Amino acid sequence: MSKFRLVGIILVFVITIVLFAGCSSAPKTTTPDATETPAATKLEGKVIVDGSGTVYPLMANIAEEYMVNVQPDVSVQVGRAGSSAGFKKFIPGEIDFSDASRKIKDAEAAELKANGIEYLEFKVALDGLTMVINKENTWATEMKKEEIIDMYLSGKFKADDKVLWSDIRADWPKEEIKFYGPNENHGTYEFFYETILGKKDMVKTANLQQEYSTLVDLVSKDKNAIAFFGFGYYVSNMDKLNAVKVDFGNGPVTPSLETIGEDLAYAGFTRPVFTYLNVNYAKEKPQVLDYAKYVVSPEGSKRLAGPNGFAPLPDSVYAEYQKQLDAIK
């Protein structure tokens, strides 16, 4: 082999190595690694929610889905102190969200303003106030709305409020009614007292409780008991309780996802339930804003309302909330 030919072969070999090295390094500068994108949006930290015991099952389910499927490094802590108790924590800025089964009051909104806290109100679903009775109660399975109101009003039948079933209808048992309900910490109590009873005094014999599980237990053990709470708690305890069909003027209506609605047959006992977002924290903590968007997304309240005993709102409502959250910078 000639000297010139050997040199030529060596030159070709060197050029080939250089070209190969250049080609193999090109993807590192022009094509990003696809696995790097999720890391940029990965969030961590805490989101603190408290308030309504009625909203609790829905919000707890949303939180669980979010932590499992969206942001596993974010800890969403959901409490159920009651609507009023939740606002007492929300006003001084102790929590990120305040769930409520009634609208915020003017006085509460004024306190938030005084504290420099901006907030957003989100309706998350619709609930049907449900009257529940013992499984052995075979007489009060259907009641008129007016009868329910009258039986819970103080002094309507007896001065000492020891009302008998026969005071409501003569052919019902001459047994004392045992009245139950959630206590003043709960928006459900306030809705019943303010909207249903028209802010008139409730019977003095009413046994009001903090825990809904306690109400379920008390009614399930007393055939003369009656209580009120959200539809979701009835659905999860149908094996222990019966729901009263309520006649609003056009015949008795069974509370259900098909009848609960502001324009549906159970409208008389239908109410929206809410969550309130601390916008200050949404601006400061990315995980709070991200969770808020999930709550009002199709995967959040819309999808999980029904399984938790709530009627979902129209898509347009959730879409408007998404716009409000997108505007937060």
Image: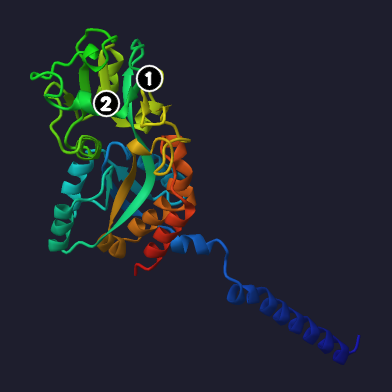
The C terminus: image quadrant:
bottom left
Query: Where is residue 21 drawn, in percent x and y?
Result: 68, 77
Point 59% across, 76% down: residue: 29
Residue under the image location 45 percent in, 53 percent down? 297
Q: Left or right: 109 with respect to 135?
A: left
Mark 1 and mark 2 in contact? Answer it, CB < 8 Å: no
Numbered disc in front, either 1 or 2: 2
| Figure check: 195 above or below 300 | above
The spot of residue 111 in percent (x, y) is: 13, 57
Write down the residue under mark 1. 242
Element under disc 2: helix
Earlier along the polypeptide chain: callout 1 or callout 2? 2
The residues tagged by marks 1 and 2 sit, at their Cα atoms, a distance apart of 15 Å
- Residue in the foreground of this view, choosing between 233 and 47: 233
Tag 1: residue type? Answer: Asn
Q: Which amino acid does label 2 sit on?
A: Ile
Pick whichever, 192 or 186, lies toward us. Answer: 192
Q: Could you tell whether 304 is left or right of 30 in the image?
A: left
Q: Quadrant of residue 169?
A: top left
Which residue occupies the extreme left position in the image? 159
**Residue 92 appears in the rendering:** no
Read off the residue under disc 2: 148
Residue 149 place in picture, x, y as percent:
24, 29
At x 34%, y 47%, the residue is 75
Q: Is residue 239 above or below residue 193?
A: above
Residue 264 placed where, x, y %?
43, 40
The numbered disc on residue 68 is none
